[in-house]
Amino acid sequence: MGAAILCAVLPAGLHASSTGGDDSCLAEGKDAICGHFYATVTRLLAAERAQASEADAHTDVTHCFLDIELDPDARIVSGTSTITATSRLAGLTTFTLDLRDNMTVDAVTVGASPAAWTRGGQTVAVTLDRAYSPGESFTVAVRYHGSPLKLGYGSFDWGTHGTGATIIASTFSQPWFAHTWWPCKESLTDKFTLDIWVTVPGWMVVASNGLLVGTDPISGNRLRYRWHEAYPIATYLVSLAATNYVTWTEYYPHPGGSMPVMFYAYPESESMVRSNTFDLVTQISTFSRPDVYGQYPFLSEKYGIAQFPFSGAMEHQTMTSQGSYVWWITPHELAHQWWGDAVTCGTWHDIWLNEGFASFSEALYLEKKPGGTHADYLGRMLARKPASLGGSVYVYDATSLSTIFSGNNVYNKGAWAVHMLRHVLGDDVFFDTLASYRRAYEGGSAITADFKAVAESVSGRDLTWFFNEWIYGVGAPYYRYGWQQEQIGRQHYVRLHIEQYQGPSYGYPVFTMPVDVAVTTASGTTTATLWNDAALQWFLLPAGGAVTSVAFDPDSWILSGACVNVAYVNGPPKLIAVVPAPDAALRRSPGPLRVQLSFSEAITCTPSDFVITGARTGQQTPSIAYDPSTYTVELQIAAATLGGDVFTITAHDSIRSVGALHALDGELVRPCWFPSGDGQPGGDAVFTFSVGAFGDFDLDADVDLTDFAFFQTCFSGPNRAPSLVECRSADADGDDDVDLADFAWFQNCFNGADRPARCG
């Protein structure tokens, strides 16, 4: 019954499902974006792509070897950063690194030889030993020392913890502060493999990226921790944390074995960390399901959490640094291993691809975990609803930390953008899109346009309207809706109008979105999905009985400012049925041809509002009779004027409703023909059907070799429906295939050229 209701209200055949439906016939919405804003978006997209490649235009960093020592008493970092890179430029003679100007460069080598270098602002320009051609590799080593500045969110922090004020050294380089503590290339797109060796006093334990491949005793009661990250990593995700950690390891089982899940906690916080991360392995297994995000991206290494002195957390690759242990932070940071670490946003304009996805994942975990429910998911999404709707998810000003990491716009509204896209695409297509996005960009970086292209490729739909509204655009819709029930014959209906009233000054004049409407009767609740793409639209929803309630967007799939229930406002009439049915193939019979058109309400009409045109016989002049009690018009054509033919019926939108005087909302789209219309007054109703003898496909009043040729075209074999609407007339026995049984009928009718058909 749900699918039947949806066929009555959706363009081109959108079907119902618990996740938003099969969108095989969901019509695309109008692109309501204004010209000035569209031009701005176009320019920014071009700039976005340029920024994504500009930092890496000349070189490709392939490996970094960071060998450093921490002196917590002096608050000094010293050591060597060795970078292997490949030239992308013909005649490359200079390699430029980022390093804060308060850090001292002691020596630079290229290969095994000393090299000249200069400092300018926050960079170190190294003169290479020769000119390098594209594809040639070189190694630059910078020996340095200094006391790193604590910038941003704590780029390098000498903090303390515990009652004894124990020192902890930790890093938080996002978005562009890695150069405060090591010579590097600050880039989102130029990923590399990593070895990070950290020497510390013997009482310290070091947590970092990748696998711990060794711990070496060093003279002076020191230890050197050697970590190796074999997966490509972005610069801002390189991290370390060192203090007197207590550690323990759990294991995530997977088809190939088990992966260590490592914990680094302050001694005084061990019980708290244990109690608040008890389900981490469950979180990993939940996100790793094939129907969620797929296997954990760094399976041959580990996942870990290291406590550090920050009020939130940071998703360092394979080793999250976490200061808060409220329940949602742990799955949020874990989800970043997929969205942020394995696939990294290509520019800071596109940070929603990291943070919006991870914030959405908090809710998704509550749904997908063992015992989770969609209600739990929805509850978390509502908790993530942005307090202000006026901003954009896309970051236009990528120079401001508060803008890049806007909790309202990037995290919350970004999460809702992902949530809404899930409903627009339906679960199967949505999760297939995420899997394809991951396959395309894992180990690299992507921008918003890349994600959009993947979603469009997987769904087979143009999603420009969605991204213009919800990613690049600002604001959100405000809705007023009203309904009343109606019974026409034996069928119950809900009349519904939807109005958007946010106004052009608050973003889009109109937001295009699929809107769920739940109709409850004594027999239960059925949800219809309506395509809302106008400021004011009217819909007619078939119901299974007397209606007790109507709920607008009951599962909160749309980020809206308000959904206000108001009194119903009368709208345009719609066609609710026609006889013969559209595309019907009829046998010729004695008497006049009768066509009945049933409307949703009382109408005013004249004979000129209806046109019947035969493909062979031309335009016919019907007589009309209107029954106001059933809202039905009957058209008649005298039998004397009829032959075998294909007839086109047009009901013009000059037909009006009696009460509101609205024009007919008449557009008919197969396969969901009725009720007609796109929700707005205006639009002719046009459909066809054929009348003739069986086998007389060319309607020339005989069944001959020309018709036999057409029958051959239609022949499909057992249990295969005809591929063409015209072939339905070749299905003599009405079993939805054109096979040998139908051929037997055709042989009986075959009579050769210029002989009247015998199968009328």
Image: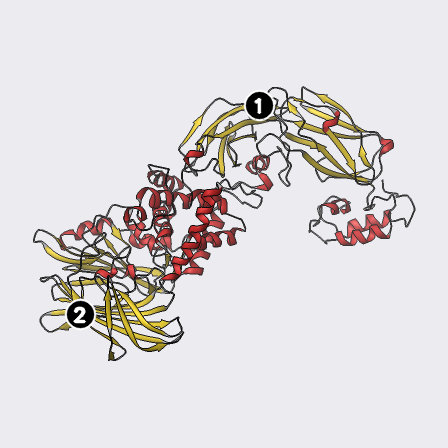
> Which three-letter amino acid code belongs to the residue tagged 1?
Glu
Going from the N terminus, do you reach mark 2 or mark 1 first?
Answer: 2
Residue 318 visible (yes or no): no
Position above or below: 465 against 663: below
Residue 486 shows which numbered tag? 1
Point out residue 116 in the picture as x, y percentages from the top left corner.
Answer: 24, 75
Of residues 481 and 579, the one drawn nearer to the viewer in this rendering: 481
Position above or below: 66 against 3: below
Residue 224 shows which numbered tag? 2
Of residues 234 and 96, the one drawn nearer to the viewer in this rendering: 96
Quadrant in the picture for residue 262: bottom left
Of residues 251 and 228, the one drawn nearer to the viewer in this rendering: 228
Q: Are marks 2 and 1 in contact (CB under 8 Å)?
A: no
Q: Is residue 607 left or right of residue 377?
A: right
- Name which residue lies at 70% across and 36% down: 581
Q: Is residue 88 left or right of residue 201?
A: right
In the structure shown, which secondary structural element does the residue marked by tag 1 occupy?
A: strand
Point out residue 536 in the picture as x, y percentages from the top left corner.
Answer: 52, 30
In the structure shown, which secondary structural element does the residue marked by tag 2 occupy?
A: strand
The Cα atoms of the two marked residues, 2 and 1, are separated by 79 Å
Quadrant where the C terminus sits is top right
Quadrant where the N terminus sits is top right
Residue 519 visible (yes or no): yes
Point out residue 470 in the picture as x, y percentages from the top left corner.
Answer: 43, 43
At label 2, counting other C-alpha atoms closer than 10 Å, the crowd grade (few under 14, some 14-19, many 20 or more) is: many
Of residues 548 and 116, the one drawn nearer to the viewer in this rendering: 116
Of circles 2 and 1, the one toward us is: 2
